[in-house]
Amino acid sequence: MGTFSRKLKAGLPLLAGVLIMALSPTVHAAFSKVVFPTADGTKLNARIYEPASGAKTSPAILLVEGSGKSHFEEELESSPFFQLAKDLSDRGLFVMTYSKRGSASNAKNGSWAKSTFWTDNKDAQSALDFLKSYKTVDAKKLFLFGQSIGCLHATLLAQKNAVIGLILFAGGYQTFLNILEEQNLEILALTGRTPVEAKKEIEPMMKALHDVKDGNFKCDRYKALCTTEEGANIVDGTQEKYLEELLKIEPLDELAKVKSKTLVLQGSSDFIIDPSEFQRAKGRLESNKNFSFKLLEKVDHLMSDQADKKMSLQAMVGMKKSKIFAPLSPKITSAIQSWVKINE
C-alpha cells in the first residue's frame, strides 16, 4: 500500500474495536465451544459462557464486535471480548461471543475480505438465533451488546428481535463518512499536525470514500489507497463493498427506531469515536424514557482506563508494536451489570 495509506492505517482499522489487553489471566472463564450456521450455510465457531453461579434462569447477552477482523491471528484469551464475557458470566449472565467469518477461530470458515456490512449483520442475527435456542437460555431474557460499529449491528438486530435490552458502547451516531473524517483529523492532530496539514493529508482518502459511497470507486484512480485481498478491493484496510453499504446508513435514525430499553455508554477518553457522538445521541433521545445514557470518565474506545485521548493514542501505538493492551475497565462491566439487573 502507498505511503499515504500507511500514514492513515491507524484510522479506519481503529474503528474495529478489535484489541488486545495486557491482562493475561491464569484462570480462564468456563465456556463451551459451539458452532452455529449462518444464513448462507457457513458454519461459525462461537463460545457460550455460563454463569459462574450455575444459575439456569439468568439473562443472556450476545456480544457484537465492530468492523475489522476478530482479534489478530487467533482467538486470544486476553482479548477485550474474552475479558468482558468472563466478567459478565462471573456476574451471573449467560454470554455468547463469536469470531467473524474468515478471522480468528473462523479463519477457515468463510472469507473476511469478501464479507460486507450486511453479511456481518446476517451473521450477527444467526448468532442471536442460536443463543435464543441454546438449551439453558431463556429466550425471553435476551440482551444485545455492541461496540463501535457493532453498535449499529446490535441496533438493527434490536429493531426486529424481541430483546429486552440493548447496550451500546462507543457508537457513532452521524453518517460514518463524517465520523471517519473527524476520526482521522483528530488522530493527526494528536500526532502534531496542524488543522491545515491534517485536512490536506486526508483529502485523498476522503475523495475515495465519497466515491465509495456513490458506487464510483475505481482502484486505478486511487492506486495508493487500493490493494486486493481474495479478489476484494481494500481501502486502507477496509473492504470497498462493506464501506459502500455502511456509508449509506444513518445510525441515529436507526437507533431512534428501537423500542427496547437501551443503555448508551461512552468513554470520555475515546479518540476513535469522539464523545460528541454520545452527546449527539443523548440530545435527540434523552427524552425517550426507554433510553439511558452514561459517560464513563477516563475510559477509551478500547474499553480500558486511560486518563485522556493522548494517553489512549500512546497505548494504541504500544499495542500495535507489542500486541499487548491495557486491562478492561471495571466501569464497563459494573455499568452493564447494574443496568441489566434493573431491566431484566
Image: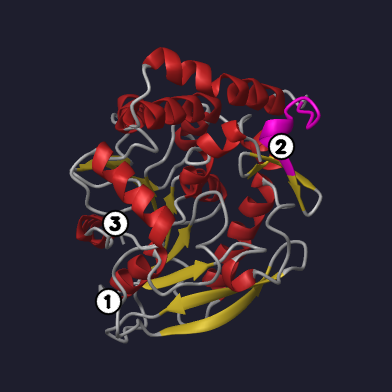
Earlier along the polypeptide chain: callout 2 or callout 3? 2
Residue tagged 1: 90
Residue 328 tag number? none
Q: Is residue 23 magenta?
A: no
x, y percent for residue 216: 78, 24
Q: CA distance from mark 2 to mark 3?
A: 46 Å
Kind of residue at badge 3: Asn
Residue 226 has which mark? 2
The answer to whether 16 is drawn above or below residue 254 in the figure is: below
- Residue type pointed to by label 2: Cys
Above or below for 217 versus 9: above
Q: Nearer the viewer, mark 2 or mark 3?
A: 2
Q: Which residue is mark 3?
A: 343
Mark 2: few/some/many CA within 10 Å (<14, 14-19, 20+):
many
Mark count: 3
Q: In the image, what residue occupies the spot 62% across and 78% down?
A: 35
Rendering quarter of residue 278: top left
Q: Earlier in the sequence, mark 2 or mark 1?
A: 1
Give the foreground label among 2 and 1.
2
| Nearest to viewer (mark 1 / mark 3) | 1
Asked if the residue at tag 1 contacts the one at tag 2, i.e. Cβ–Cβ closer than 8 Å, the answer is: no
Check disc 1 and give the amino acid type.
Answer: Asp
Report if the CB atoms under discs 2 and 3 are less than 8 Å apart. no
Relative to 30, is 312 above or below? above
Q: Which residues are magenta?
A: 217-227
